[in-house]
């Protein structure tokens, strides 16, 4: 226990619950006589949570929105104090809680590297020694002296991630890090996380992707309404969690005859289509075409219709193989895209700048979910076929640009296509 990276014992945290009509200005508060300023009740965001993460292990935390995942992550990171129990962290913490939160858009990338590094606990001299490695990892050498406001969201997140992973942490706290950058950069992030594990770093990952937790973590913890449902083998925990979600979705799925999409694919309820149909996906287009070269751009357009107003839905896109293996997984929540209330017809698009997949037949799966991930409004599984052509068609999934070096002689650069 003494050598454990993270020890959480009997952790509990309470918050006040206020009226939805709570005043937001001093004038409103004065006019209401300060009555609605008082909390209506107290509630436990976390209760009786205990676990350890030894050095060299990774724990994945899953659960619906409001389950207490973010509160747990913040308390372990030293932000706030518990009302019950204790948190013990042995070693320097590296936190990927909110990428770029300490960055300033009027400063250049270079200046933000130094600000972010110092905020993370490094000295100015230490940041200077690591500066070239940070910029190289982020792949932003050409832009590092440009103001941050000229960067795309992906570029800002790449820079923030690079700063965070160059602080030599003994404990790493991660919140949905795989939403950073394209697939090639995500693969580099995964490699760096694996290096931290091998070096004895204790890692805690909060994720809405059960597949991500099952793939990356040594153990998984499922939170529901602030309490642990189960903690253990990721395959078992994720299986129980997804079964509960699937059960609720299937319970809400109405019986209806098969339908045919505009592209000619058949949608069969409780076979390749699931959901309450409060929001319906009416068409999915893969652009420019559904047959691409590895490394090409892919745009996914999702048309939907919502007869009634729906608050803050979550849209998701994944790419899977025939055997169901998820090769890519993204959703509007982990990419920090705030969704407005929707009603009527609409369209949402996902742009993948380069899809570095090995050659083969894949499926693009699309879904729209209730704001807490409790169930799906509509989910289409292995309906939309995607053919990727590449030099590699065997065991590999990822196929980024690469080259061999033999005896100091570099071979020609090999593009995916």
Image (spheres, rainbow, N blue to C red):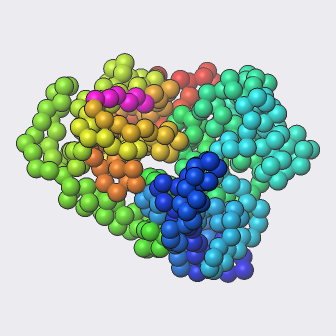
Please give left or right for residue 303 compared with residue 215 in the image.
left
Residue reaching furthest to the left: 257
Q: Residue at x 24, y 45 (%)?
A: 278
- Asked if residue 249 is among those painted magenta in the image, a careful observer would answer no
Residue reaching furthest to the right: 125
Please give left or right for residue 345 compared with residue 124 in the image.
left
Quadrant in the picture for the N terminus: bottom right
For residue 293, say whether it is visible: yes
Q: Position of residue 28 (x, y in %)?
A: 58, 49
Residue reaching furthest to the top: 288
Is residue 212 or residue 301 the one in the foreground?
A: 301
Q: Position of residue 368 (x, y in %)?
A: 33, 43
Please give left or right for residue 133 compared with residue 238 in the image.
right
Q: Is residue 187 above or below residue 106?
A: below
Q: Residue at x 18, y 52 (%)?
A: 253
Q: Which residues are magenta?
A: 345-350
The image quadrant that residue 413 belongs to is top right
For residue 215, say whether it is visible: no
């Amino acid at each position: 226990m003494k050598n454990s990276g993270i020890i959480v014992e009997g952790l509990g945290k309470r918050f006040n619950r206020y009226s939805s009509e709570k005043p937001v200005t001093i004038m409103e508060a004065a006019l209401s006589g300060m009555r609605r300023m008082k909390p209506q009740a107290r509630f436990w965001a976390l209760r009786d949570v205990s676990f350890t993460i030894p050095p060299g292990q990774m724990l994945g935390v899953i659960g619906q929105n409001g389950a207490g995942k973010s509160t747990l992550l913040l308390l372990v990171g030293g932000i706030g104090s518990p009302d019950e129990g204790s948190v013990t962290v042995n070693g320097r913490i590296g936190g990927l809680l909110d990428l770029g939160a300490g960055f300033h858009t009027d400063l250049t990338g270079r200046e933000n590297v130094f600000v972010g590094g110092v905020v993370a606990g490094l000295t100015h001299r230490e940041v200077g020694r690591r500066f070239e490695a940070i910029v190289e990892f982020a792949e932003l050498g050409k832009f590092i002296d440009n103001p941050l406001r000229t960067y795309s969201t992906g570029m800002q997140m790449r820079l923030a991630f690079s700063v965070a992973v160059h602080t030599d942490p003994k404990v790493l706290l991660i919140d949905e890090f795989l939403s950073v950058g394209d697939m090639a950069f995500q693969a580099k992030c995964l490699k760096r996380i694996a290096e931290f594990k091998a070096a004895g770093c204790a890692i805690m990952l909060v994720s809405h992707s059960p597949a991500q937790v099952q793939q990356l973590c040594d153990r998984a913890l499922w939170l529901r309404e602030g309490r642990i449902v189960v903690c253990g083998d990721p395959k078992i925990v994720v299986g129980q969690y997804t079964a509960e979600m699937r059960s609720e979705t299937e319970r809400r799925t109405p019986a209806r005859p098969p339908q045919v999409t505009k592209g000619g694919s058949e949608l069969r309820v409780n076979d390749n289509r699931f959901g309450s149909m409060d929001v319906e996906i009416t068409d999915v287009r893969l652009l420019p075409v559904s047959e691409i070269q590895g490394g090409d751009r892919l745009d996914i357009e999702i048309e939907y219709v919502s007869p009634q107003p729906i608050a803050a839905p979550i849209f998701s896109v994944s790419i899977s193989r025939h055997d169901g293996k998820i090769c890519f997984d993204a959703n509007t929540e982990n990419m920090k895209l705030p969704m407005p209330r929707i009603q009527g017809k609409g369209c949402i698009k996902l742009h993948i700048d380069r899809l570095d997949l090995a050659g083969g037949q894949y499926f693009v799966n699309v879904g729209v979910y209730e704001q807490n991930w409790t169930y799906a409004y509509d989910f289409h599984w292995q309906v939309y076929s995607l053919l990727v052509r590449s030099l590699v068609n065997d065991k590999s999934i990822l196929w980024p640009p690469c080259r061999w070096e033999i005896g100091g002689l570099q071979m020609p650069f090999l593009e995916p296509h």
